[in-house]
Amino acid sequence: MYPTKALRKFLATLTSRPNPVLLDLGPVIGPNVSFFGEQLGCKILVEDLYADLDRLALAGDEALAAHLGTRLTQADASIDGILCWDLIDFLTPLASQALARQLTRVLAVDGALLGFFSTAASRETTFTKFVVEDEQTLRHRPYGVARTRARVLQNRDIIKLFE
């Protein structure tokens, strides 16, 4: 179990909206769908980009960036909240820039993106399934992927990625 203050802030942003739309970029996790549905009464869209990473593991950076640059089909500014988990840690700069452009495009004005990023270099071949226990607590479960973590982003890198 891991405490979090960020989830509470993310929820506060979305509770002020009637019928928010939430985009989860990770695999479907039943308890999370239930939690966000009960807390927000929201519509939840799941786009499992981790599955795309596995499928395109050998395709090369340009092919992955091209895929991520067109992967999200939601309308501009149509998403109130995005759950990005640790996905960007597994992307090279070119691919992460392509994804960030799409996330910025679909995120509504005054929307919120909750993202988790590594703080230490690692060659792990697992990403983390984050299971929401309550608004202050997450549980982590490792999940195998074909790619390794590509890099560690500093705060300034994350801000620049989403500017």
Image: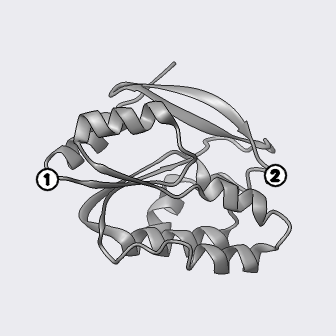
- Tell me if 98 is positioned left or right of 122 in this view: left
- Tell me if 105 is positioned left or right of 8 in this view: right
Q: Which of marks 2 and 1 is in front?
A: 1
Query: Furthest-right residue in view?
Result: 58
Q: Mark 1 points at which residue?
A: 18
- Tell which of 68 and 100 is nearer to you: 68
**Residue 155 location in percent, x, y?**
49, 53
- Tell which of 34 and 118 is nearer to you: 34
The residue depicted at 13 percent of the width and 53 percent of the height is 18
Q: Which sits earlier in the primary sequence, circle 2 or circle 1? A: 1
Q: Are marks 2 and 1 in contact (CB under 8 Å)?
A: no
Secondary element type, mark 1: loop
**Residue 147 location in percent, x, y?**
79, 54
Q: Mark 2 points at which residue?
A: 146
**Residue 33 location in percent, x, y?**
41, 39
Q: How crowded is mark 2: few (under 14 residues within 10 Å), some or many (20 or more)?
A: some
* Location of residue 129 (image quadrant): top right
**Residue 105 location in percent, x, y?**
39, 75
Query: Furthest-top residue in view?
Result: 1
- Tell me if 57 is positioned left or right of 115 in this view: right
Q: Is residue 121 above or below residue 64?
A: above
The residue depicted at 40 percent of the width and 29 percent of the height is 4
- Tell me if 126 is positioned left or right of 114 in this view: right
* Distance between mark 2 and mark 1 Cα atoms: 39 Å
- Tell which of 67 and 89 is nearer to you: 67
Disc 1 residue type (three-letter): Pro
Secondary element type, mark 2: loop
Disc 2 residue type (three-letter): Ala
The residue depicted at 71 percent of the width and 73 percent of the height is 64
- Tell which of 105 and 75 is nearer to you: 75
Q: In which quarter of the image is the C terminus?
A: bottom left
